Image (cartoon, rainbow, N blue to C red):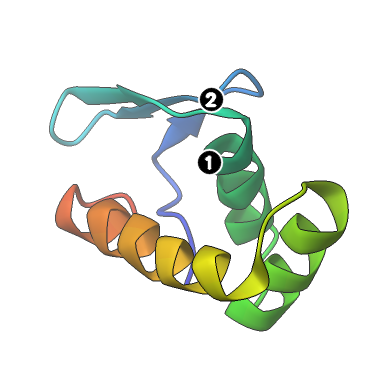
């Protein structure tokens, strides 16, 4: 999975899709996930890094990551 090339993002968690005109804001973890997706990291690599950096339960995060990436797909952020 990867972020579409035309999607604008910021370190603060702002996401803009110029194709649809939609914009979104994420929290720190969402922003970090988007950064990792832009680096073409796998879901396993994303899970490992987020669980190392933030105090999150691995199983809960894996479910949240699935939900988050589903939303990104729904809003045409992911390829």
Relative image position of residue 52 (x, y in whole percent): 86, 59
Q: SS class of the residue under badge 1?
A: helix
In this figure, what is the number of numbered marks?
A: 2
Residue drawn 61% across the image and 18% down it: 12
Where is residue 54 drawn, in percent x and y? 77, 46
* Number of the label disc, if any, that sits on residue 30: 1
| Dots 2, 1 in contact, CB < 8 A | yes
When the figure is inspected, residue 23 is found, relative to residue 73, above or below; the finding is above
How many neighbours does mark 2 have within 10 angstroms: few (below 14), some (14-19), or many (20 or more)? some
Residue shown at 45% from the left, 49% from the top: 5
User: Image quarter for residue 25?
Assistant: top left
Q: Earlier in the sequence, mark 2 or mark 1?
A: 2
Q: Is residue 79 visible?
A: no
Percent position of residue 47, x then y:
67, 70
- Residue for badge 2: 13
Image coordinates of residue 17 in percent, x first then y, are: 28, 33
Viewer can see residue 19: yes
Write the residue at 52% across / 28% down: 27
Quarter of the image where the C terminus is located: bottom left
Q: What is the C-alpha distance between the residues marked 2 and 1?
A: 7 Å
Compare residues 17 and 52 and report the one nearer the observer: 52
- Residue 66, compared with residue 3, is above or below; it is below
Q: Quadrant of residue 16?
A: top left
Q: In the image, is 60 to the left or to the right of 16?
A: right
Q: Residue at x 46, y 55 (%)?
A: 3
Above or below 34: residue 42: below
């Amino acid at each position: 999975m990867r972020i579409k090339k035309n999607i604008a993002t910021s370190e603060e968690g702002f996401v803009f899709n110029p194709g649809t005109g939609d914009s979104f804001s994420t929290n720190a973890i969402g922003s970090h996930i988007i950064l990792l997706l832009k680096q073409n990291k796998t879901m396993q690599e994303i899970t490992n890094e987020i669980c190392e950096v933030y105090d999150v339960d691995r199983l809960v995060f894996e479910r949240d990551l699935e939900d988050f990436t589903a939303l990104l797909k729904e809003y045409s952020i992911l390829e």
